[in-house]
Image (cartoon, helix red, strand yellow):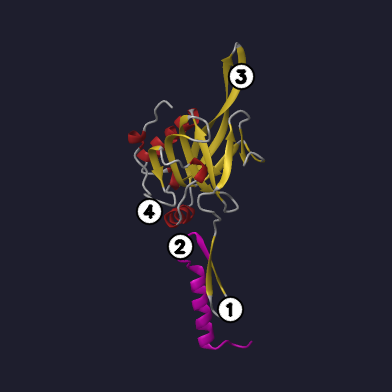
């Protein structure tokens, strides 16, 4: 067997070490063996202000992408940014909203909106996390469409609300998302009016704002009010 010169082995080891340690947790590295050039590539894809739109259809109890591609009746993700706010958006009048941003299994940055009882259910998740010294950014949030019934015009009608639970998240995945939110403005142009009453937020900022405040307001200070 031909042995590599010591200098070549050392150079290979150096390149391998560089390839294994990207400068940010959301980056991956590659080394050109011919030139030794190291390149870094983001694991996430995001056009600032235009995340992939994930919608919750409260009539059907289903999630979808842009109203067309079905995703089923549940979602699981690690939030990288969010805000709970009151505003008049999407021609729906002034309501209390929760807007969460996350990376899907293909690395696309997505945004999903909830309002009404679903927001109250999200607060019920935020409160125990707060007392455990955690935020939504530290866990895998699981969202499940839950069927409800009501009487309307003397007829039984059904609708769905989102119910939330969580499980521990991989700390490396959490760190990747935290650093991505530090480096990029996380927002959605269609829902950004400049007139929102922000109740609590984490990692959210539009292109006019500076670095995001990666610290959510305590749940007790951000109690929901009637929309």
Gap in angstroms between the C-alphas marked 3 and 2: 50 Å
Q: Which residue is mark 4?
A: 210
Instruction: Count residues near mark 2 (Cα–Cα under 10 Å), then give few for <14, some for 14-19, many for 20+.
Output: some
Q: Nearer the viewer, mark 2 or mark 4?
A: 4
Q: Are marks 2 and 4 in contact (CB under 8 Å)?
A: no
Q: Nearer the viewer, mark 3 or mark 4?
A: 4
**Residue 33 marker:** 1
- On the image, the x and y values in percent for residue 197 come to 39, 36
**Residue 70 marker:** none
Gap in angstroms between the C-alphas marked 1 and 3: 64 Å
Taking the magenta stretch, the answer to whether it contains residue 18 is yes
Gap in angstroms between the C-alphas marked 4 and 1: 39 Å
> Element under label 4?
loop
- On the image, the x and y values in percent for residue 26 come to 49, 59
> Element under label 3?
strand
Magenta span: 1-28
Q: Earlier in the sequence, mark 3 or mark 2?
A: 2
Q: Are marks 2 and 1 in contact (CB under 8 Å)?
A: no
Residue at (34%, 39%) from the top-left corner? 218
Q: Earlier in the sequence, mark 1 or mark 3?
A: 1
Q: Quadrant of the C terminus?
A: top left
**Residue 24 marker:** 2
- On the image, the x and y values in percent for residue 61 come to 61, 31
> Element under label 2?
loop
Q: Are marks 3 and 2 in contact (CB under 8 Å)?
A: no
């Amino acid at each position: 067997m031909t042995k590599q010169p010591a200098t070549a082995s050392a150079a290979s080891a150096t390149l391998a070490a560089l390839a294994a340690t990207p400068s940010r947790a959301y980056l991956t590295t590659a080394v050109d063996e011919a030139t030794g050039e190291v390149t870094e590539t983001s694991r996430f894809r995001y056009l600032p202000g235009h995340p992939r739109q994930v919608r919750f259809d409260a009539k059907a109890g289903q999630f979808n992408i842009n109203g067309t591609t079905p995703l089923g009746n549940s979602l699981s993700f690690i939030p990288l940014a969010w805000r709970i706010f009151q505003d008049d958006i999407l021609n729906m009048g002034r309501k209390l909203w929760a807007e969460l941003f996350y990376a899907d299994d293909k690395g696309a940055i997505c945004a999903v909106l909830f309002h009404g009882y679903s927001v109250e259910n999200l607060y019920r998740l935020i409160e125990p996390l707060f007392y455990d010294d955690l935020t939504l950014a530290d866990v895998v949030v699981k969202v499940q469409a839950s069927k409800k019934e009501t009487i309307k015009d003397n007829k039984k009608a059904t609708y769905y609300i989102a119910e939330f639970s969580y499980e521990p998240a991989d700390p490396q995945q959490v760190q990747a998302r935290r650093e991505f939110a530090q480096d990029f403005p996380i927002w959605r142009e269609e829902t950004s009016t400049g007139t929102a009453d922000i109740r609590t937020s984490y990692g959210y900022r539009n292109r006019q704002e500076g670095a995001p405040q990666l610290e959510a307001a305590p749940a007790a200070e951000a109690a929901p009010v009637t929309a």
